[in-house]
Image (cartoon, rainbow, N blue to C red):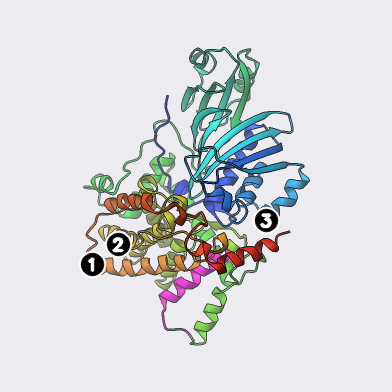
Amino acid sequence: MSDPEPIPSIFNDVLGPVMRGPSSSHSAAANRIGRLCRDLVEGDLRRAQIDYDPNGSLVTTHKSQGTDMGLYGGFLGWEPDDPRLPEHASHTAAAGLEIEVRYESYGATHPNNYKLTLEGVNGSRHSLQAISTGGGMIEVTEVDGTAVRMGGDFFETLVALKDGVDAGAALEELVGDWDCERRQACLGDRDLLRVSLVEEPAPESVAALRDSPKVEYVRVLRPVLPVLSRADVAVPFLTVDAMQAFNEGKDLSLWELAVAYESARGGISGDEVIEKGKTILALMEDAVRTGLAGTAYADRILPCQSVTLLEREAEGRLIPGDVTNRIIAYISAILEVKSSMGVIVAAPTAGSCGAMPGSMLAVADSLGADEEAKVRALLVAGLIGVFISKHATFAAEVGGCMAECGSGAGMSAAAMVGLAGGSLDQQLSAASVALQNSFGMTCDPVANRVEAPCLGKNVLAGSNALSCANMALADYQHLIPLDEVIQAMNQVAGAIPHELCCTAKGGLSVTPTSKAIEKRLAENEP
């Protein structure tokens, strides 16, 4: 049975992960991959060899964007928001974990490809390849030389067969009576049986597999995503056109359609969707408060600036901006929390974690919106993100900052219109124009850090969202339907030069000042 195409979840793909670190693609995704590696060796690791293809992005992001922190934390069994992550190096050393990082061309077809060779303290040896697909999402593509396709949203039981065992027959004999979501035989260097479950397999079932003379080993890889999948997941729509057709005669608002979608995707009630939204909202609001109270962290290139903005505004030294200045302050605050290793929600990514949450919350607070209205706005943003995730990308390594801050602008614009009482059509119009305005944005971080020009681009995204929201509320024409805009966005992503997609090989990344800052940071490393 082949794997179906992934169906995005608002709380997996868009409003998450909850994390620490500079990059969801490189910190949180690496953490998730590392935790799966730990399950693959069944416990603590003794040694890990990490191979990055120089044609990809991971060579330049391993240290500067927290890939090492995320991956090693995952090896140690930590979650992506664990407070120990900044001290990962000392914990890795204390655990006796030997790590070798190598750069060699091996034909990786994705810019975020991890090729890992692992040894557990129990002596088990395995290999794994995986990719980070954007926004903290991952896909395991190979285990022990055998092609697989796992997204981290099941309990995955892997059964390695001994040489000469017929995989097709073994599939029926060994796991044919398992009550599972999906089972399949994967043929490769090491033939594997793969059984996908929404609950951890019963210990006696796993023990029976281990006792079989046909089985080399059994491993259970636990899910790393908050919303699990299941067999034959069916959602009411995956495009804007299909959503509007679904809504005929129902007259649901956009936030209600978001609840209907995520309820179907996650197999949870509408009330549970709302509660998850409240949890995410609280984390975002806490990041704003924490940032505006002032942050400090030695290893960053921008100081705390949101506090200064508020001080200058109170002194009357800024150009009057009301909501715009609040957007700048909130976005800056969230990004400063991120850069000080605080907890943020990558929505849709860590690099753009201020764009949507900061601007949406600034407008919500300016309008005096209550918790219920904010959660509804958040779900609207999440649903717009689902359409982008499914038909384009959140990965800057694929689509530049258009994929991150551009997406955040479209999501936030729709949410703002909802907060202001606009119609469903006006919300879609705002998202369309905000995305149209974002085409071609490069990802060229200074000193290869996710701080600048990321801050300015997040603020640009928030300002774009506000402008487009008001344009939509005034019934400006958006001309191009949102579905078509997202399709065009994906085409533009494919045309952006590799050097301008988070590789530190073009744009501001290679300016003399950027290189000087990068050198200074390297000299300050312990």
Q: Are marks 1 and 2 in contact (CB under 8 Å)?
A: yes
The residue identified by callout 2 is 433
Residue 418 position, x and y percent, is 34, 62
- Is residue 62 covered in magenta? no
Q: Amino acid at mark 2?
A: Val
Residue at image coords 59%, 41%: 104
- Residue drawn at point x = 69 percent, y = 53 percent: 84
Residue closest to the eye, 244 or 126: 126
- Describe the element under mark 1 as helix, strand or loop: loop
Specify few, some or many for label 1: CA neighbours under 10 Å numbering under 14, 14-19, or 20 or more: some
Measured from the top left, where is residue 293 in percent x and y? 60, 72
Front tag of 1 and 2 = 2
CA distance for labels 2 and 3: 39 Å
- Magenta-tinted stretch: 318-337
Residue 289 or residue 394, whichever sits in front: 394
- Say if 305 sits above or below 76 in the image: below
Residue topped by disc 3: 86
Q: Amino acid at mark 3?
A: Pro
Q: Quadrant of residue 286?
A: bottom right
Q: Please tell me whether residue 326 belongs to the stretch shown in magenta.
A: yes
Tag 2's secondary structure?
helix
| Residue where numbered disc 1 is placed | 476
What is the secondary structure assignment of the residue under circle 3? Answer: helix
State which tag comes first along the sequence, 1 or 3: 3
Badge 1 amino acid = Tyr
Residue shown at 36% from the left, 51% from the top: 495
> Mark 3 Cα within 10 Å, few/some/many (few <14, many 20+)?
some
